[in-house]
Amino acid sequence: MVALAAGAAYFLGDGAATPTATPTMTPASTSSAAAVATIGQYAGIVNSSITDIRKDWSSYDRNCWNRSPRLATCPIAALSLGMAGQILDLKLQGAAKLGAPAYIGAPPAEIARLVADTQDAARKLSTVGQAQTVDEMQLFLAVSDLLDQFDRWEPYI
């Protein structure tokens, strides 16, 4: 969790973490005024999470969902899904936060609602997946919502 907190500080530009590598994203503008990023930049951020989250959910679905007895690794698999949601949320926050090292600019108007919906779904998955006791139905609903958002990104990826 410490590493995740350091990563959050880095993405959001809170100054609490010093990156060990140069960020791979380049700002949409070098001026201090708020910029608008491209659809491709935001699609790239989301696309970097899609494969991992789909793979993690497929594994959870196969090994844990509605299974009795549950495997000992199921709580860790749920936590992994929750952390993946949190990372996606933090990436999207950092991309839009002026002054953050990961800043690329505000999302274009065409995808602003989609970005907000994706962040909401990622945040919900983060909360449910990292809960002390995972409610499988809530996890299923949270993952389903995020996967629905990923499907909405298809025209841009």
Image (cartoon, rainbow, N blue to C red):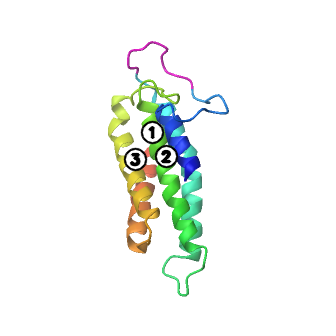
From the image, tell me which residue sits under label 1: 92
Residue that extends furthest to the bottom in the rendered view of this protein = 69
Q: Are marks 3 and 1 in contact (CB under 8 Å)?
A: yes
Asked which secondary structure carries label 2, the reply is helix
Residue 95 location, x and y as percent? 46, 32
Q: Which residue is mark 2?
A: 88
Q: Position of residue 34 (x, y in %)?
A: 38, 20
Residue 156 drawn at (x, y percent)? 48, 38
Q: CA distance from mark 3 to mark 2?
A: 9 Å
- Left or right: 130, with 116 as reference point: right
At x 55%, y 42%, the residue is 6
Amino acid type for the residue under numbered disc 2: Leu
For the residue carrying disc 1, how many other residues have a C-alpha within 10 Å: few (<14), some (14-19), or many (20+)? Answer: many
Q: Earlier in the sequence, mark 3 or mark 2?
A: 2
**Residue drawn at x 54%, y 50% as measured from the top left:** 50
Q: CA distance from mark 3 to mark 1?
A: 9 Å
| Label 3 CA crowd tier, 10 Å (few <14, some 14–19, many 20+) | many
